[in-house]
Amino acid sequence: MRPWAQIRPPGESTFVEGRPVRASVCLVLVSLGLTGCYGATGYDSREPLVETANGPSHASIMPTRRAGPAPFSRDDLEDLGGPVIPEATMIAIWWGQPSRFPADAMSGMDTFLTGLDRSRYVAVVDQYVRQTTRTTFLGHIQETSPSPTHSPSTEEIVAKVCQVLQDARQVPNPTTLYLVFTDGFPEQSNFCAWHDGGRCPDGRKIRVAYMPNLAGAPQCDPGDLFSCNGLSQPTRALANVTAHEIIEMLTDPDGNGWLDRSGEEISDKCVWRFGSCVALGSTRWQLQKNWSNADHGCVQEKAPAAPRVASTRSP
C-alpha cells in the first residue's frame, strides 16, 4: 500500500412511536501503532431472504420502527454451527458526496466505532463466541462517486466494496466488517439497514453492511430518550442501526450462526427496545438492547466475561 493522502485520526424502556473518483482511505493500524492514509456471493442461510419494498433481497434487514418493538419471545438463540467472528476489524466506507452527509456523521461514527471495542455493550456477544469479543476500528474510506438512489442489491454493495479495496490496495478480509454508509436514503424502503455477504472477483469472502443516510428518515429515528450526547439526530440514529448490524455480523455473519427458532438474530429480537445510555469510551449513546441467552431476555450491556473455550469456528 502506498500512502498518498493526508493522515487523519479516526476520531426496559420501549420506544413508542457521475464519474467514479479514486477513493482515499485513512487507516489506524492499532496492532502496529501506526496511522496512515492510502489511495484507494453466496452462502448457506437458514433465515429466508427478505424482499424489500422496492426489489432486492438481503439476508438480514433491520425493520423500521413502524413495525414496533420486536414481539417478546422467550426462545433463546440456537447455535446452528455456522461461523462467528470473535475478533473483528471494521472499516467504514462513506459513499457519495461529503456535503450530503450530516456534518458530524463521519467524526461521530469514528468515535462510536472506536469505542465499541471491549465495551460492556459488545460483551453480550462473548457468550456466543466463547471468548472476549474484539472489534478493532481501522478507519474510514471516502468514495465520492455517486451512490445508488435506488435500494441497492447485495451484489452492488459487495462490488463497490471490492472496487474500493482494490483502489486502496487492500486485500479483502473475511473477518473485517465493511460498513457502507451512503449519502442518500432509498425511497419507500421498509428497512433501516441490512447486512449480508459475498465474494470479490478474486474469490475472497467479505461481510458487508449497508447503512443509508438517515437524515429525513423518521421511520429509523429512535428518538432522544435519555439525552446521551449532543450529536445530530441523523448521526445518533445511524449509530443505533450500525450497532444492530455489527452485533448481528459478529454472531451470525452468514445466516447459519446464532438464531432463534423463528430465524431471528440477536438484535432482531430486541429491535427498538432501549434501557439507558451506553458508554463507549468517553461518549454515551442510545443503542438498542440485544438478546442474552444467559439472561433469557434483552439486555443493554453485560460485564465482559472471562473466556471459557476459545472459538475454533472458522469465519
Image: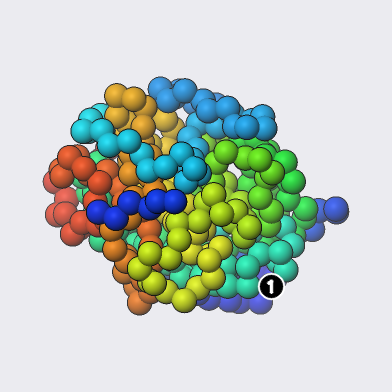
**Image side of residue 194 versus residue 124, left or right:** right
Q: Position of residue 17 (x, y in %)?
A: 44, 51
294 w.r.t. 231: above or below: above
Q: Position of residue 294 (x, y in %)?
A: 15, 43
Quarter of the image for the N terminus: give it.
bottom right
Quarter of the image for the C terminus: give it.
top left
Q: Position of residue 178 (x, y in %)?
A: 53, 50
Residue 213 visible in the picture: yes
- Residue type indicated by callout 1: Ala
Q: Position of residue 49 (x, y in %)?
A: 51, 25
Residue 239 visible in the picture: no
Q: Secondary structure at mark 1?
A: loop
Q: Residue at x 55, y 41 (%)?
A: 191
Tell me the quarter of the picture where residue 262 sits: top left
Q: Residue at x 29, y 29 (%)?
A: 260
275 w.r.t. 257: above or below: below
Q: Which residue is mark 1?
A: 5
Q: Residue at x 68, y 57 (%)?
A: 183
**Image side of residue 64 versus residue 99, left or right:** left
69 w.r.t. 141: above or below: above
Q: Nearer the viewer, residue 223 or 141?
A: 223
**Image side of residue 39 versus residue 221, left or right:** right
Label 1 crowd (10 A; few <14 / some 14-19 / many >=20): some
Number of numbered callouts drawn? 1
Q: Residue at x 77, y 53 (%)?
A: 146
